[in-house]
Amino acid sequence: MSDPIPLLLSYMGGQLKATKDEANGLLLFGENGSEGKFRLTKRTRMVSDRGAGTPYTLNALWTLAAHRDEKYANYLRATDKANRVAFKDFTDLVKYFKGLTETIPQLSMLPLDTMDVDEPEDFAPTTEAPTALDVPLVLTPEEEMAKEALFTRLQNGEFSSPIPESSFRTKSNEIVDSVRALEQPLYTTSSVLSSGANFSQILRYLVSFKKQQAADQRSNQKKLVKEAHARSKATGGSRYDFSSKEVWRNAGVGDVSDLGISLGDNKGKAKPGASKRPRSKSSSSGPPTKKSRSSSSRPRGPPIIIVPTISLVTSFNIKDLLVNSMYVASKEAKEKSRKAGRPTDSHVYIMNPATKEQFEVKTNGKILRPSEWERVIGVIAQGQEWQFKGWKWALPADIFGKVNGFYFHFEDEAVPTNVRDWNVQKIQISKAGRHKDKAASLIFWGTIEKALRTDPEKWDQYRRSNA
């Protein structure tokens, strides 16, 4: 019998014994090959790619028989590429050899001579290992082209000694292998169809840029503080009186001298006569005009600052930061007031240490009367929009478009995304550097003073009522 497929079926059904002779490269069916002897490299009528590829060798089918009860993943790890059946053929071949089906697409019905599988049934084992010439050659299109080119050169006499055609297979493979070794794939099907762009790299660059930008900003601030300390030490001043003009100017307030504040020997006290503002004509003696009557009919009282109940700056510690220039945690300040027997209510008054003007601090914007809303000069934001629920203006854009907004945060913490879009002054608080609290206080009062100067006629009446 020259076809090993039926014998292999009998072996896998347990009806026939089969052994593998590794030394001679043979597969023996029956006792010592009594039923048949075949080379392991023999091509069979089982064709790969569901009948559209090349014939499988007997060794590939024998290896499949040894792993027929395993999953393909385990079979893949236990076999080498030369003696392995493809994934698309694995299930069909296992079913066929187990006797679960009589026909499969891989089983070719062509005569054995056309499959190039004819061999004697019995032959004497050879001690020589099979050579490359014993295996029928299947050339790829590239190898066929190389073969034609080589024969053309032989016919043209380009070689001194002709190469026998029988040895062409070895020479052809050497030529093709040498050419392929010099080739480098530029594109593949996957690389052409995919964009290949990695946009996550852009996000990493952006985060790195933001971190570097923040580091540069902190470095510049430290440099300005050191320079201010050096100038203050050279003039004999206190380190807490450093560079007030620069702090206000960087905050967008302008020149501090416009506020009537003297720095240096006067320790931030107002210049004599600075708080006296020129009287308007409507305030002169004589019967009040229509304009003066309208102004005098407005309710009187100090400007109002609204603070949240939960924030870095609340009604309990606002005086420590903005008046004493020393930040204290809100919870600590509240406990300190309770132990000292002072009232811990949320309605307090603070005074601008430079101008000695008084400001009223309130926490609940819901209960403010319309007349009190006219006196609101600033709002300290907590960072959440629900803080403004029930207010005269419910949207942050409306609130901070009409009054000054402030947002206090620790210098090592990022500002929330929604707060970045609000028209508020972002003021940093240091967790450990209490000498920096003076700068935060100056930025706050500088912004308030600038707002007071934008409408002097309105705010002067509150100043007079508070005098």
Image (cartoon, rainbow, N blue to C red):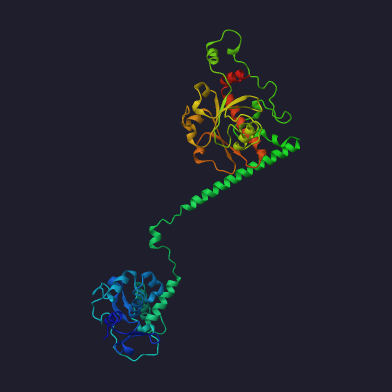
Decide if residue 311 is in sight here.
yes
Quadrant location of residue 314?
Answer: top right
6 is higher (above) or lower (below) than 216: below
Q: Quadrant of the C terminus?
A: top right
Q: Nearer the viewer, residue 131 or 320?
A: 320
Quick check: can you spot residue 157?
Answer: no
Horizontal and vertical percent position of residue 449: 60, 27
Q: Residue furthest top?
A: 286
Residue 213 percent location from the top left of the image = 57, 45
Report the front residue among 35 and 144: 35
Res. 237 image quadrant:
top right
* Residue placed most toward the observer, 335 or 449: 335
Q: Tell me where residue 242 sits by quadrant.
A: top right
392, above or below 8, in the image: above
| Spot occupied by residue 17 in the image (x, y as percentages of width and height) | 32, 85
Residue sitting at x 52%, y 33%: 423
What count of labels does the image hold?
A: 0
| Residue 389 spot, x, y in % from top left | 47, 31
Q: Nearer the viewer, residue 326 or 135?
A: 326
Q: State left or right for residue 370 relative to residue 168.
A: right
Q: Could you tell me which residue is drawn at 66 percent across and 35 percent down? A: 326
